[in-house]
Image: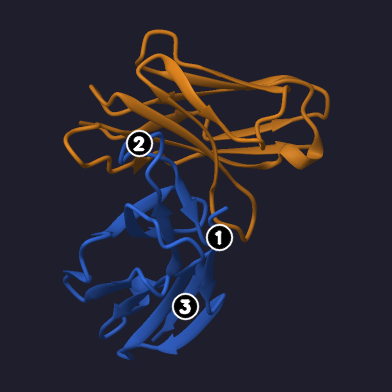
Chain colours: A blue, B orange
């Protein structure tokens, strides 16, 4: 059974700092890994998706890396801003039924607070 | 394209009552997923549909839970005889299976509180 763990559970940083969020998963047979952002009481917004054959993806100040063999991914946020404050979730998708489509298995999230 | 919508956004009910939630996916998306998220945890998979067929159900989906997608468009999730442990955010996601991609887009969720 796939298990996804995120460290740290919570992180508080001053504005402008660069930071790294960590995600690990137990079964390396994944199809892709996705990072989401969730604001309090809201749904999920996809930030970055990395296919299993890729090593990293970048979008603006965000960079996500994937080391499938070791079961790890990191989300790097550069020059953090108060508006980045949210819960960050990573999720892995595993092939299902011989296809590449399936459910997402989520970590418990990292609560990020960026203070001015 | 208005995104995935869910109704109601909030539901407060007494233990033992039945509740039904609705999810309207993005138009033409053929896959629809339900997840449950409790406070401080990540979402957990409940079930998914390919068009109108329910293809997978989690063990979390007890016999008090039933989901339907009768015409392959909107979906409903019903919980019978609610228990306090059912209190959670219920998230719906939809995707369009195309080639090798299946990116899920999430709705805002329905927050259920069972008193």
- Tell me the mark number nearer the camera, choosing from 2 and 3: 2
Q: Quadrant location of residue B19?
A: top right
Label 1, secondary structure: give it.
loop
Mark 2 lies on residue: A98
Residue name at image x 26 percent, y 86 percent: A79
Calculate the distance from the C-alpha at mark 3 to the C-alpha at mark 1.
25 Å
Mark 1 lies on residue: A3
Do residues under tags 2 and 3 come within 8 Å of each other at their CB atoms? no
Residue name at image x 39 percent, y 29 percent: B32
Residue name at image x 50 percent, y 82 percent: A11
Mark 3 lies on residue: A113
Q: Using the rendered image of the protein, determine whether residue A38 is visible from the camera's viewpoint.
A: no
Q: Quadrant location of residue B70?
A: top left
Q: Residues within 10 Å of mark 3 (few under 14, many from 20)?
A: many
Q: Residues within 10 Å of mark 2 (few under 14, many from 20)?
A: few
Calculate the distance from the C-alpha at mark 2 to the C-alpha at mark 3.
41 Å
Residue B13 appears left or right of B15: left
Q: Chain of mark 3?
A: A
Q: Are marks 3 and 1 on the same chain?
A: yes
Residue B19 appears left or right of B23: right
Q: Using the rendered image of the protein, determine whether residue B94 is visible from the camera's viewpoint.
A: yes
Image height of B70 relative to B100, above or below:
above
Q: Which mark is residue A106?
A: none
Q: Chain of mark 1?
A: A
Earlier-in-chain disc, 2 versus 3: 2
């Amino acid at each position: 059974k796939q298990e996804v763990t995120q460290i740290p559970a919570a992180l508080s940083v001053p504005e402008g700092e660069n930071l790294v969020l960590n995600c690990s998963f137990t079964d390396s047979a994944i199809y892709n890994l996705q990072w989401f952002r969730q604001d309090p009481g809201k749904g999920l917004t996809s930030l970055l998706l990395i296919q299993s054959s890729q090593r990293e993806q970048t979008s603006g100040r965000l960079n996500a890396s994937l080391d499938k063999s070791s079961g790890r991914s990191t989300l790097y946020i550069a020059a953090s801003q108060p508006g980045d404050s949210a819960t960050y979730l990573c999720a892995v998708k595993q092939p299902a039924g011989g296809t590449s489509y399936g459910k997402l298995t989520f970590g418990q999230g990292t609560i990020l607070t960026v203070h001015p | 394209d208005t995104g995935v919508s869910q109704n109601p956004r909030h539901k407060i009910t007494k233990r033992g009552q039945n509740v039904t939630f609705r999810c309207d996916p993005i138009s033409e998306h053929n896959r629809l997923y339900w997840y449950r998220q409790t406070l401080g945890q990540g979402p957990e998979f409940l079930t998914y549909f390919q068009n109108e067929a329910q293809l997978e159900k989690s063990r979390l989906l007890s016999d008090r839970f039933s989901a339907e997608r009768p015409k392959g468009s909107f979906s409903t999730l019903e919980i019978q005889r609610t228990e306090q442990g059912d209190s959670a955010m219920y998230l719906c996601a939809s995707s369009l299976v195309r080639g090798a991609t299946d990116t899920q887009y999430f709705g805002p969720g329905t927050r259920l509180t069972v008193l």
